[in-house]
Image (cartoon, coloured by chain):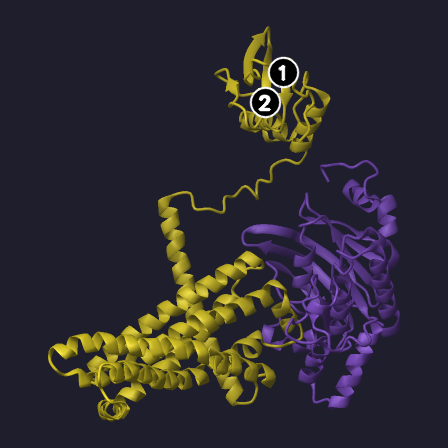
Chain colours: A purple, B yellow
Amino acid sequence: MNAAKICVRDLTMTYGRLVVMHDLNFEVADKDIFCIIGGSGCGKSTLLRHLIGLLKPAKGTILYDGDDLTNTPPEDRGPFIRRFGVMYQSGALWSSLTLAENISLPLEQSAKIPATTVRDLVSYKLALVGLAGYEDYYPAQISGGMKKRAGIARAMALDPDILFLDEPGAGLDPLSSRRLDDLILRLRDSQNSTIVIVTHELASIFSISNKVLFLDTATRTQGALGNPADLRDHSDNPAVRLFLNRGATPDPTT
Amino acid sequence: MSSANPSTSVAAGPPPPRAVWTREGTDTILALSGDWHRDGPAAEESEPAPDHHPDHYRIDGLGAYDSTLPAFLLARCRAVTTATAADKEKIPAFDGLPDNLRGLLELALAVPEDSQALVTPHASSEVRKLGKFTLRIWSGGCAIVDFTGQSVLSLGRMVSGHARFRAADFWLTLEECGAQALPIVSLISFLIGMILAFVGNVQLTNFGANIFVADLVGIAMVREMGAVMTAIIMCGRTGAAFAAHLGSMKANEEIDALRTFGFDPFDFLVLPRLLALVLMMPILTVYANIVGILGGMLVGFMVGIPPVLYWTETLTAVDLTNFSLGVIKSVFFGAAIAISGCLLGMRAGNSAAAVGQATTRAVVASITIVIVLDSAFAAIFTLLDI
């Protein structure tokens, strides 16, 4: 039995015949806020989609508390899926449903829950992300930042113990991004969730993450793994130091 | 792009852009002259260009330039083929070029070409194109068969009470497929009935048998035209809407979000649409038959056939067999339209353009399938002598 919450071994991801990343090896411990970082198009979101089982790796295994997700047939993945909460890059709220319906749908489908309990749970989840009172709004009627927060509220609908967030701060102003970081920290502390975040927002990485995985576009493998501040100051990989220092002198080669 | 040497007005016109390769001892020199503008004349280059980078550039006669000049120089750098892979990644010296031009070229060459990205996504020969086309047709056929099979399995799960979808979605789709389609179905069917009656009347009057217009319109509507025209309307209206809706959901990652909550997108999205269209198509077809017959009756009235006589003649001509054939066909048409629309929506790419393509393909595919199915039914009914 592996002690790590998530354990990735020799993971190789491909897109057609193109190798996106190969031989990724990392572990995420319980209650980590684990950031997957790297340049645009390096495969961060693709890795996240492998982690949640939407894509099948070309090689390697992904273990959750020692249980192998990769070799579990899709129809038997229920126990894994129930542990995941996923917020997609765009929020991916179901556009034909109100915010309340977006959150209540997974609740109603997961078990027989009385309508009043569902209503209370929806209000609670929306209140947690600062959207109390927006129950009857449709996704098209709220701002981008609100959509992200509503996406987090929906991801938390079933009280998952692992939360996956795909670029939560992208496209947000600094204040909204900061509020989102505070929300993520509070969720980790109050709900004891393990949080995996795909991001390249440096401010967020340093303020909330305790461990990062750097995907190196040049070598198509992991460039570094560790604490973000340590990597920024002491990484052997100059691309990692440059990324985390945001290159005092812009270098077009990175 | 800013010009390093802004051109001054010259009455005789700007000098043409030229690139002349010369040798001075062991050095190769590339002399650049003239004004380089994208709307000016093409650059003249002395032949032959050597297969290596120049050792030095000369810009004595160089006038004003825009991106045309760095683009020309970059193309020459890329064209050097004798260099080793290591040399290719090394940025050549641009001795003699202005600082800003050198900076731009160094920037353009800073990231070497990605050998994996250079694999051409396009077929390069007619044989390859034919092969890819054949494979695409084969995979499309397999996808239809697979999707149809999944539809049957999904229906099975619904019957056994294991399929999960929102009843509200089903009722909403039922309304969209049914009640909201009535105006267009009414208009088209009425006009089709009138057209059939007009055409029939012209010919039958020659034989003094224009009362048989009622037979012609009645049989044509209930056996063929009611079901086919309703199906074609639904292809353009509902099939396209299914593809666009599901395609948008896929582009917005909404379908992935369903999967991550453990919903089967097939049960959740395809099943209610399939059920709604299969249920509504026969009803719409019966409605279209009646409206088409009324259209024919109006024309009959205009050419002197009393409506009561027309109606009686229609009832005599249209038997239950003809009526049933049209209705049975409509069920298959409904399933084909729903499966085509949902299949192409679910297989759409993740962009707005891909959603548009999926919608177009859904309409074309569903109309084609409806016509092919109708031909197959005609052949089968002929063989069975019904």
**Amino acid on which disc 1 is placed:** Leu
Gap between marks 1 and 2, in whole Å? 8 Å
Which quadrant: the N terminus of chain B? top right
**Amino acid on which disc 2 is placed:** Trp
Outermost top residue: B25
Horizontal side, residue B272 vs residue A198: left or right: left
1 and 2 marks in contact (CB < 8 Å) = yes
Residue A126: x and y in percent read 80, 75
Q: Which residue is mark 1?
A: B62
Residue A202: x and y in percent read 82, 51
SS under mark 2: strand
- Can I make out residue A138 in this image? yes
The residue located at (65%, 32%) in the rendering is: B108
What chain is tagged by disc 2? B
Which quadrant: the C terminus of chain B? bottom left
Residue B36, numbered circle: 2
Outermost left residue: B207
Residue B294, numbered circle: none
